[in-house]
Amino acid sequence: MIKVVLDTSVLVSAFLKPGGVNALILQKGENEFQLCLSEEILEETGLALLTYERIRKKYGYTDNEVLEYLAMLRITAKEVLGKLPKIRVIIRDPKDDHVLACASNVEADYIVSKDDHLKDLKEYKGIKIVSSQDFLRILKES
């Protein structure tokens, strides 16, 4: 089974739009691929959902819903990594390096991201970096 790391942008979008493409990817993670996450990815997801007032006002959800979502991600993910080695790859946005570190540590096949800094790399150590739409296409073809 292929190993996949979903970055924060995909996880936040899956929470905010339960009927959207990113939520569909997350649902497929239960049977069609092995979801791998890190504590940093989960923390960043929680931070975005709990502290970005603009998002909270637009979507109107509770802290408890976010905490339940994060708990569900921990259960759904086949692997949740703790402290990752520090790497420096993405010069324009170094806070995205932890996604690459997670994917490298679990020897992922794919990183799925909405983040241009990651997608512009296209690949890292043999790990393909793709958009949500491209990943759904890959799943359909396999």
Image (tube, helix red, strand yellow):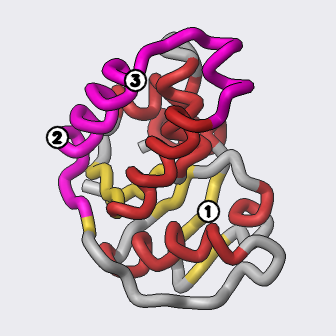
Classify residue 85 by image quadrant: bottom left
Residue 37 falls within the magenta-colored stretch: no
Q: Quadrant of the N terminus?
A: bottom left
Above or below for 24 versus 87: above
Percent position of residue 67, x then y:
31, 31
Q: Nearer the viewer, residue 132 or 58?
A: 58
Q: What residue would you read off at disc 2?
A: 75
Answer above or below: position of 8 versus 129. above
Of callouts 2 and 3, the N-terminal one:
3
Q: Earlier in the sequence, mark 1 or mark 2?
A: 2
Q: Amino acid at mark 2?
A: Ile
Please report contact status of discs 1 and 3: CB closer than 8 Å, yes or no: no
Quarter of the figure that contains the C terminus: top left
Residue highlighted by disc 3: 63
Q: In whole angstroms, how far apart are the C-alphas of marks 1 and 3?
A: 31 Å
Picture coordinates of residue 86 (x, y %)? 49, 89
Front of the two marks 1 and 3: 3
Q: Amino acid at mark 3?
A: Asp
